[in-house]
């Protein structure tokens, strides 16, 4: 296994910190805290560089708030300075760990994502079922309270296998320990997305190399396996549960381990996937009509522009374009007129 021993200087260099700033501030220039930091940008970046170089840097507190996407999530927002550090660390670590990830891990990776994950799942279903002529079953499960349960010590030990620069490890550990008390990662951190993949890659490797599971894919903590034998998947579930508990201190959600025939469809990453087609979840449909109704009222009240309303409608039509939803798209367009 290749290891890295000289990351820190590149990670905290002024050049990398300015690049991190450019990536971070994109789309956030209207935020007051971002504007305040930019007011003395060069002075702030060089001050941050000195703090990091002298190992005087301390991660600041988080600001917590809730969002719905669609379920309620507790987001923790770091300060601007800390988020620049997150981007700098991410840019250094991501290429190192990217080469270790399996090709069917779809979360928070360039060129991957939910739509590609659903496409691959459907392709697996077609292949396993021999184009619908044979049996096909799907096991889907996810981890209970994943982001709240990630063990700091285990995560750091996994990262240390490849990173042996003690200063870089100090900074990584500072970020990991900036949240929670020995476990947990803030959903709002860019680094949390990478740490989640590094952590769950341990399960990916176990599934592919120890259990030799052929048709396996993962998105963050959502796991799906396709097979032509129901009994094979039934035997797989306790092995997955045992590995997560003994190696990663995680538990499968007791009510979200589902195993059934593909004929019944599988709810995965926002779509209900069948062998030949896919649908949008009922909850997603209801949410679309509700949100667009709210946005239309805002338009008529003068709170949003016609362009903003049209962009919202187009974004939902984009989601529908990845499923067999011709009638639903027509219904959406018929109900919500296009403002001129």
Image (cartoon, helix red, strand yellow):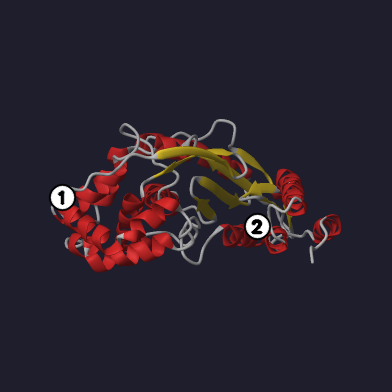
Q: Quadrant of the C terminus?
A: bottom right
Identify which residue, 332 or 99, lies in the foreground: 332
Residue 26 image offset from top left, x and y in percent: 45, 63
* Circle 1 residue: 55
The answer to whether residue 3 shows anywhere in this view is no
Drawn side of residue 25 relative to residue 7, left or right: right
Q: Quadrant of residue 64?
A: top left
x and y percentages locating residue 102 in the rendered image = 43, 59
| Disc 2: CA contacts within 10 A as few (<14), some (14-19) or many (>=20) | many
- On the image, which quarter does residue 96 sit in? bottom left
Q: Residue at x 44, y 54 (%)?
A: 208
Q: Position of residue 136 (x, y in %)?
A: 67, 51
Q: Mark 1 falls on what kind of element?
A: loop
Q: Residues within 10 Å of mark 1 (few under 14, many from 20)?
A: few
Q: Position of residue 335 (x, y in %)?
A: 85, 55
Q: Which residue is mark 2?
A: 125
């Amino acid at each position: 296994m290749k290891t890295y021993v000289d990351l820190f200087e590149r990670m905290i260099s002024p050049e990398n910190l300015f690049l991190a700033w450019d990536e971070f501030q994109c789309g956030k220039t209207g935020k007051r805290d971002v504007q305040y930091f930019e007011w003395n940008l060069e002075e702030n970046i060089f001050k941050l560089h000195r703090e990091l170089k002298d190992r005087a840097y301390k991660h600041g507190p988080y600001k917590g708030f809730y969002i719905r996407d669609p379920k309620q999530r507790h987001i923790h927002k770091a300060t601007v300075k800390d988020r620049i550090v997150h981007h700098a660390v991410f840019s250094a670590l991501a290429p190192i760990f990217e080469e270790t990830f399996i090709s069917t891990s779809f979360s928070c990776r360039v060129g991957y994502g939910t739509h590609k994950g659903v496409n691959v799942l459907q392709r697996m279903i077609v292949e396993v079922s021999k184009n619908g002529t044979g049996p096909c079953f799907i096991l889907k499960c996810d981890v209970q309270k994943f982001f709240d349960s990630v063990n700091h010590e285990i995560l750091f030990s996994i990262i240390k296998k490849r990173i042996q620069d003690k200063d870089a490890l100090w900074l990584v550990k500072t970020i990991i320990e900036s949240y929670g008390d020995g476990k947990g990662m803030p959903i709002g951190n860019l680094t949390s997305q990478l740490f989640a993949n590094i952590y769950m890659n341990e399960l990916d490797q176990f599934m592919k190399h120890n259990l030799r599971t052929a048709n396996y894919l993962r998105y963050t903590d959502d796991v799906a396996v396709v097979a032509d034998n129901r009994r094979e998947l039934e035997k797989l579930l306790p092995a997955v549960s045992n590995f997560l508990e003994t190696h990663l201190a995680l538990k499968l959600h007791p009510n979200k381990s589902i195993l059934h025939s593909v004929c019944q469809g599988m709810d995965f990453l926002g779509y209900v996937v069948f062998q030949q087609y896919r649908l949008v979840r009922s909850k997603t449909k209801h949410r679309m009509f509700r949100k667009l109704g709210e946005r239309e009222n805002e338009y008529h009240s003068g709170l949003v522009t016609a362009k903003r309303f049209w962009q919202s409608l187009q974004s939902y039509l984009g989601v529908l374009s990845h499923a067999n939803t011709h009638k639903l798209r027509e219904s959406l367009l018929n109900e919500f007129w296009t403002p001129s």
